[in-house]
Amino acid sequence: MSTSTTPTRTSRPDFKGRVSGLPTSAKIVLWALFAVFLFALPLLNIPFITTADSDFGGVLFTVSTYVLVALGLNIVVGYAGLLDLGYVGFYAIGAYVVGVLSSQHASLPWLVAVPVAIGVAMISGVILGAPTLRVRGDYLAIVTLGFGEIVRLSLINSQWLNGAQGISNIPRPPGVTLFELPSLDWSSGAPVVDLDNTTTFIKFGIGDFIPYYWLALVVIGLVLLFDILVKNSRVGRAWEATREDEDAAELMGVPTFRFKLLAFSLGAAIGGLSGALFAGKAGFISPDNFILLLSILFLAAVVVGGAGNRWGVIVGAIVVGYFPERFREFAEFRVLVFGLALMLLAIFRPQGILPPRRARRVRRADEREEHIEEGLPDA
Amino acid sequence: MPEPTMKQSEAETDSVIHTEVDITPLDLGGSTVPEGEKLLEVDDVTLRFGGVVALDGVSFDIRKGEILGLIGPNGAGKTTCFNVMTGVYQPTSGGIRFLGAALGRRKKFAITKLGIARTFQNIRLFANMTALENVMVGVDAHHSTGVISAMFRLPKHRHEENTGYRRAFDLLRFMGLEDKANELSRNLAYGDQRRLEIARALATNPSLLCLDEPAAGFNPAEKLRLMELIRSIRDQGYTVLLIEHDMRLVMGVTDRIVVLEFGRKIAEGAPAEIRDNPAVIAAYLGVDEEDAS
Amino acid sequence: MQFLIDNFAALTVTGLAIGAVYSLIALGYTFVYGVLRLINFAHSEVFMYGSFAAVWVVMVIGGHPGGSIGQVIFWVALMFVAAMAMSGLVAVLIERVAYRPLRKRNAPPLIALISAIGASFVLSETMGLREKIAGWFGLDDTLRPYVNNSRNNVPLPSIIKPQGVFSIQGYEVTNVDIFVIVGAIAMMIMLDQFVSRSRLGRGIRAVAMDPEAAALMGVNRDRVIRVTFLVGGVMAGAAAVFYLLKIGSTRYDVGFILGVKAFTAAVLGGIGNLRGALLGGIVLGLAENYGSALVGTEWKDVVAFVLLVVILLFRPTGLLGESLGKARA
């Protein structure tokens, strides 16, 4: 096992090679450090990265919803190869289910409403997918586009959902007040611990969005784990085979429709989860939060990053979610810029910034093969 | 040494086939047919596309344990026949019985699961998946791991992954592809891709393996090895239906032959009978008997 | 229900007029789909640019209410020329920039669709930010009337006063209604003749049927594709004029909803089928007007989308089937 971990494909050990060559314990430490860094990011207030014009915690939360949504959409677009242009519809459904159950028509706690939101989003994914996933891929794009608009228009027109005014007073996630965490102040040029500017661990209040970002990080971690486990199984292989050649997959015994529907509804569920998270942070939702443009930005996140590679789409989501906030002065040009980016990527780099990394898979498979060979009685 | 340069390049890409590896069909508890009995019956199948008659009242059967050749000139309806058997097309009239039951309007994947697997005339591997993963997709045909099992790494998932990978790897070894298990299938040499397609089809544990021109593009030496391979697949307990253009290959490897022309069956019998059948010679070669020899 | 019955004539005339506009836009989708097998997502922007060209040309020449008949005809003719030229140009530009590089590499259709989505956003945002963009060149003051309120409705200066010509069931059918319906249908008949009679039309059908065989027979595929985009664009330009005459204003994102509806019309009639586009547009126009009378106008767009989903469900090849050449899966 340990003998094979030295990289054989490249002669000079690059950063990636060196990291993967480390013993498992060191890897765990590195990952833990990275996680701590992510959690501490809004407190560190690192110059240049930190957004000056808007609350950094809020920005980080927005970026993490993009990441979450992109991970969900990646299952649909990247793994199963289905172009979904109405993903915002599921995001809206998730948010509105929370709004309805916790404020508009009932007063369930946020935590209870979230699983319902996920479930409803998933079911609506099945309802939309069952008739449309049989049609050709490019038709699906238009149907889902229509779906996104149907959801938004229905929200506006439905008095039961309070129409264009939206739903307010959505309860926050439950918290426990444990201790205060100070943040860093860089105004003097060097970091100084600023004891006046603290964040309560862990209180979901108004004005300080850092705890919401922490919550989002935890959810992202869980979704990532789910993603990795499911992708690396029969389900992931079936998605990939379907995307590569649907007819051949079907003839090799893959019930392609069923797996496409599965991808679609899992994506919808994650979209609904993101919406629920958003509702819990915003406290107020209205149809204006769920315009078509969001669907396109979500898609841009996936495609820009590299559809099919979860790390790629995370990068893509950060690009799409973070840059407009960091460079507020250009915010009105962002659609133009993303439109341009989509075009340029399609033309020059259709696989995205970080295309699916086959090498990584091959390495993993090598290990598996060794495992099998060792296990063989006659080998 | 004859043709040294050719052989050299070939030796680099070709690897040893381990036909001794045990790849006998798994017993999955389905219905079985005794050796020599009818496995699949094509019963008066007609298929029309608009005004074109692709298959016209074709009937034949495939017996368990044999290698049946399906031959005929271009456009005779051989691949169409495959497509009807595997559920790609529904026959306009007539039907197919497999393991004693009508295929009816079963979905393609359900037919595969029932025990008919095929390869494609134009290679249709999953290009961006590794050779091993390609075979695993076939093995997965009989697996049932879903999201829940995968998510919680339940015993079912672990068991299916372990036995599945072992089976897939055995199949690759059988085909001599074990060194290329982790290559992306699109990077494989042409001959390897052809053999990988067979491995992937075998992975679905078929009672009937349908090979659609597996020797297309092969040189004589490769064809010889392929014949040997097909025979050893049969010897491991599979029934094989073979579409092939190369008469020598078909004559050498098959037990019986069915000849199609213009969608109609014009002859059926042992290779020796077919070889001497004037109708076949006329149809197949489109010339007189004496010119054929 | 009573509302539907009482206003049946009005709903029918409006439905026919707006349906005729859908049909003309749908032609662009159907044409490109027939030849290239892909959805030209950016086609809606082709329409939008045409509508702006038409509005601007009227502003430039100073069209005003109460012009003489001759003047009005001249203004409308200029609108057509400007809109068709602009739309044709934009359509050809889209083909050149967003599609041709992909075609050269045989990119999968989904990539082409993503490129088209990108192009669509670039085009509509460029229009929506025209005040800023003009500002970069110091032209915002010079062009003030044209770039003002970039993100709002831009009205067409009123040049025709709709006048009742005859009335059915108490609804005055106006000269504009008649002009839009008759004009749009006349354009489509002309196009149908062009495709079935002319040499270029034969080329288009040949490429749609079998690109490789067409190439072997000496049809210049690139040229045919360019012409296809051009013709689709010109039709969208005409649609823009009819739309303006009927609705009276446009805006930078007008294309989106109209585009989705026109695409629905194309699918409804059978994408790739010219006569299907006509039928689909009319059916959709009528259906959404009747439908909104039943369930409320605010649900009008929802009716159209639901119709799209239902068609794909029960008859994915559309009412008339898919055939510019012949349908291929």
Image (cartoon, grey):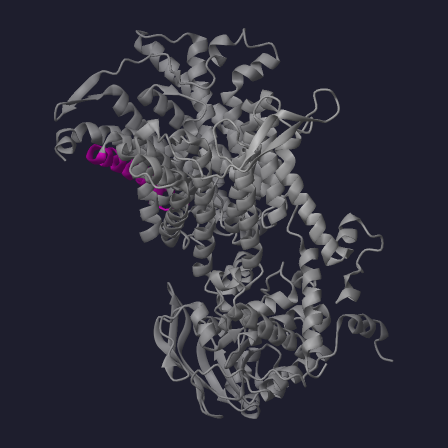
Q: Name the residue at the front extreme.
A: A178
Is residue C290 covered in magenta?
yes
Residue A190 location in percent, x, y?
75, 25
In the displayed structure, C246 sits above or below B192; it is above
The residue depicted at 85 percent of the width and 79 percent of the height is: B2
In the displayed structure, A246 sits above or below C270; it is below
Residue B8 location in percent, x, y?
83, 72
Q: Nearer the viewer, residue C291 or C190?
A: C291
Q: State left or right for residue B251 relative to residue B53.
A: right
Instruction: Assign the N terminus of chain B to one quadrant of the image.
Output: bottom right
Residue B177 location in percent, x, y?
69, 73
Image quadrant assignment for residue A173: top left
The residue depicted at 47 percent of the width and 28 percent of the height is: A206
Count of all numbered marks drawn on residues in the image: 0
Residue B93 location in percent, x, y?
34, 74
Q: Nearer the viewer, residue B223 or A247?
A: A247
Is residue A100 covered in magenta?
no
Dominant SS in magenta: helix
Instruction: Determine if residue B146 is in view.
Output: yes
Q: Which residues are magenta?
A: C269-295
Instruction: Assign the C terminus of chain B to one quadrant of the image.
Output: bottom right
Instruction: Determine if residue C89 is in view.
Output: no
The residue depicted at 52 percent of the width and 48 percent of the height is: A77
